[in-house]
Amino acid sequence: MNKSMLMFIKVLALYIGTVIGAGFASGQEVLQFFISYGVDGIYGVIVVTICFAYLGMIIMYLATKFKSGSYQELLPYLIGPMYKIMDYLSLIMLLGGLGIMLAGSGAVLNQYLGVPNYIGIFAAVIITITVIFGGVERVLSANLILVPIKLVVVCLITILVISNQATMVPTQVVPAAKPLVASNWFWASILYVSYNMIVPLAALSSVGRLITPKIGVLAGLTGGIILGVITGLITIAGLSFYPEIAKYPVPMLYMAEAVAPVLRTVFALLIWMAILTTAIANAHGFASRIAPNDGKKYKLTGAGVCIAILPLTTLDFAQLVQKLYPMFGYAGLILLVSLVIMPIIRLIKK
């Protein structure tokens, strides 16, 4: 495989890996932002797919244009004098996201393997620190291994579920009486994109100096489309089990057990591995912001933040997703709007 193709795959895996974390791979995130709105949630998926593809291209174009090593180098261009506020908000969101990933790693092993939460959490912490100690190249390599695994797992589960249904999209699904994250499906999809751009911006901007604009933009576009397709598959599959799946912290495992109970343990372990990629991306994004030169300070920061965030993992995983993610979405609206319109404004001025 030539170097350009390898870098394309690494960046593609990094983008997908930062979005498909604990909330996504567990199904909890898709449940709350799409499935709970019934069939209308599919319209939200279409909005999200377009946004992921466009924003992935924009982030990678800017990262390669500025040869960035961290997102701090892009924020002044995107939001001007307000970049310091967004910088602090991004750090907080990266911390919160890391806590959710680690809590999710404990919830998965506890729900279906009966392993105490703390074992899954500490195992995830150790692996994350090990990857961070290898620097940016090891982060890319880890995603290259783990992301295909979780793509296969998520797609396999959802395709098995959909193939077992009489119709591909159930039409008699009653939406939740009280929306979980937003008043309607459109606003839920915007918030979903908004908070999901924080970690990709942090992770993707750190590799701007390593790749060419063509590779970066193509990886951003491809990654966005893949993310949209997978979100759609989970939504369609989840509609078949709604509202039963709302009772479980890891809906994907509930669906997996329903269609292939013999593979319960395998799916649990694979979803746990899938969660690791976003935990790594959050820790990497935080560390690369504090120490963009990928040296000793970067490694110590990445390890330190993994340990410091452990108290947050004692809270309920489903509640963390329901409460923190919408908050992150509102906080990230400034960044989302800037990513959408600022490049257009700059282009018009030129």
Image (spheres, rainbow, N blue to C red):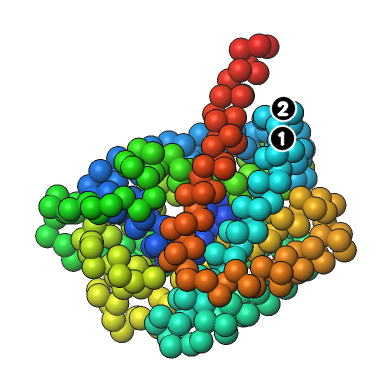
Can residue 131 be seen here?
no
**Mark carried by residue 83:** 1
Measured as percent of width and height from the top left, residue 271 is found at 46, 71
Along the line of sight, the residue nearer the viewer: 342 or 256: 342
Is 32 drawn above or below residue 157 in the view shown? above
Q: Residues within 10 Å of mark 2 (few under 14, many from 20)?
A: few
Q: Amino acid at mark 1?
A: Tyr
**Which residue shows up at 23% across the image and 61% down it?**
242
Q: Amino acid at mark 2?
A: Gly
**Which residue shows up at 47% across the image and 76% down it?**
107
Quickly name the residue at label 2: 80
Measured as percent of width and height from the top left, residue 150 is found at 47, 65
Is 172 drawn above or below residue 116 in the view shown? above
The Cα atoms of the two marked residues, 2 and 1, are separated by: 6 Å
Can residue 194 be seen here?
yes
Element carrying mark 1:
helix
